[in-house]
Amino acid sequence: MAIPKIKKQDVLDALKYIDENGVPFHNQSTKYELVTEEGKKYPPKYVIAVADHIANGADISVEGFNAVEAKTYLQGQGFDIQIKQEKYELTITADVVTSTDERFTMDNLSLGDGYKPLDAYFKRANGEVVKRSYSKGERRNSNQTMPRIACQIFEKQISGLSVEEKENFPVCKYNPDSEMICGIYSNVDEFKKHRNTIEYFTYGYDNGRQFVIYCWNIFSTIIFVQECLKRFGDAGDQFILTYREKDEKESKAETEVTVQEELIQQFKGYRNPYSSVLIESKNIIFRGAPGTGKSYLAKEIATDIISNGYFDDYTMLTDEQRKQVEFVQFHPSYDYTDFVEGLRPRVNEDGSMGFELQDGVFKKFVARARKNYEDSLKSKEEIEKEVSAQTMIDDYLDDLDLGNNDSTALKTVNGHIFYITGYDERHISVYIPDNETVDKLSVSRDNIQKMLESGKKFTKVKEVTEFFGKKFGTQGYSYELPICHAIQAKKHRKPVAGTGSVELKKYIFIIDEINRGEMSKIFGELFFAIDPGYRGRAGEVSTQYSNLHDNPDEKFYIPENVYIIGTMNDIDRSVDSFDFAMRRRFRFIELRADDHLEMLASLDDDELEAEAIRRMSALNKEIANVAELNENYQVGASYFLKLKTLDFDQLWTDYLQPLLQDYIQGMYDEKGIMDKFAKAYGYKKPNDGDVNEAIQD
């Protein structure tokens, strides 16, 4: 099947022909529509057929190509193709299930993945209509609405079933060859013993009791609903479901919601109570007095989450797991270039200096998380294609002798010679001797990989342009095409066997002393993207240097599997200027001085630990008694970890005393206040003789 040889002008002429002659009923589109700027709508397949008739004299026939091919071709020519929005109605009775959509069949309930519910209700035999009694916060129309109405109508009958009857209650059978999914369970844990998945819904009743039932797409509970009618309904009762096809954006958005639910459901047995807080909130900031262990706690939480609750010591993470954690510390000179992206100096091959766009630490980190997020959504087949393409590119590039022109010479489709001079993870550098204007170019390695993954045999630059959905080709396409041909012509080793689906992982970015940086200068337009409510493509933004990217149209977004922990000292003067726009995007958690005394267990001396706690508590009590100070000025347990190498007096003179003196500088009776602090801590100033003896010792 293939699109006939036609041009864009033939399509425009076809639209005029259709305006004059109309569309035969049997050629009306069921899925896609070509929509003009004036709002006129045409069936894509029929448009192609008429264009073929005008250009080639062929009979007007939609045979020989399908709707997707027609859609893809017309989009490549710059026409706007939209999914035809038509409502369908599904009727379920005890005996039969019918739909106004002729494509519907009970033999393939997986089709429900592509539809969105608009309404659902129960209709009694006497004509009475019963709709869902929504609980607070429940979405009005979802894949769960219809089975929830069934539970609402037949709550007493379902709850009266025996345990065995509930466990054997039929729910879903996707096709004649698949298993029947059964079971109405009393809680999520019981459900997961039988089917460990997030594909379920819960219905609450009778003061805390639950029905937990398998539920995935819009059709996945048809059998459950019909069984309820068979067992509990009256003759003539029926459920009505109104739905339509999803568009691409809705499909992506639903996938992202599913991923977020999976991240939350994935594992709740964390060792640290703050771990679950981070998963639920996305962004948190630990604030409090100095030495309360904020940075220590941040790494502990990251380790807890990354290891799925196995340990909380960061040093126990493997090298691969540590790639899921990044740690930076803000300071007044830290900026957007360090954090997101910016121009950095580089030495060119000829020894001259130039600049290149480089990603900052946060963007690099997000790229790792985003790849995992996007790979986790791919099927096994898609991943195998990707690995195979990567292997082919690596094989080809590794065998090149970059200093030998015979090894690296290639020709464009127009016969112009060029040479490969180098490569990295993202680009392949080429030298074009015949081009007097631009003789050096970096082409996209990612573009070549996508071309290889497609399995298509590209022969023209125009085909590459259409493949990437562009109206106009780029200079890079002229060189990516012959490189792709050269890679395809080479014999390659087989990729590693057993490539399977990718596990969705969590990535944690820690920003120490977050308040010491100038937020607007560091984050720029990312204020929007880091908002917990705009994770994923909903928060896409163009970065400041997007015009310098390989694909200027590519947007930056932070995927659902990225979590951010910040730390800040309440008494730091820079806190006063902390950006309010940033404040509302984080959940602030206060850590008091005595919140993490357990860290002192690492002193490995029970008596020393007890004495440290006693002195710290006494000192903090005295600090709180000073009118101009408060709990934010108390000292935390991390200061006392220095007792591993110091004694109590050294800790006072070298660390605590200078800190406290800075706190009370300018207050009335500074000496008197410091004497009270020293007495509470238990420090006694040595007399001159003691000092001389100590020096001699």
Image (spheres, grey):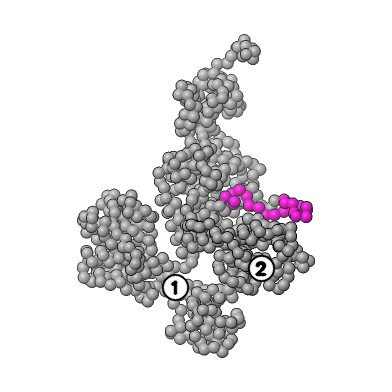
Q: Which of pointers 1 and 2 indicates the residue nearer the eye? A: 2
Residue placed at 38% from the left, 75% from the top? 103
Compared to residue 346, the image places residue 54 above or below, namely: below
Task: Please state, as top left, top right, bottom left or bottom right, where the C terminus lies in the image.
Answer: top right
Q: CA distance from mark 1 to mark 2?
A: 42 Å
Splitting the image into 4 quarters, where does residue 468 fall? bottom right
Residue positioned 53% across, 28% down in the render: 641
Residue 22 visible somewhere in the drawing? yes
Closer-to-camera residue (400/610): 400
Nearest to the observer: residue 414 or residue 245: 414
In this rendering, would 119 be left or right of 337? left
Residue 587 in the image: x percent, y percent? 48, 45
User: How many marks do you count on the picture?
Assistant: 2
Residue at x 47% of width, y 72% of height: 83
On the image, the x and y values in percent for residue 318 come to: 52, 43
The span picked out in magenta is 345-365
Mark 2 closeness class: few <14, some 14–19, many ≥20 residues within 10 Å: many
Q: Residues within 10 Å of mark 1 (few under 14, many from 20)?
A: some
Q: Secondary structure at mark 1?
A: loop
Residue 85 tag number:
1
Question: Which mark, residue 482?
Answer: 2
User: Marks 2 and 1: in contact by CB < 8 Å?
Assistant: no
Q: Is residue 610 magenta?
A: no
Residue type at mark 1 is Gln
Mark 2: which amino acid? Pro
Looking at the image, which residue is at 63% across and 55% down?
A: 425
Q: Is residue 432 left or right of residue 324?
A: right
Badge 2 marks a residue whose secondary structure is: helix
Residue 602: where, in percent of width, then height?
A: 49, 29
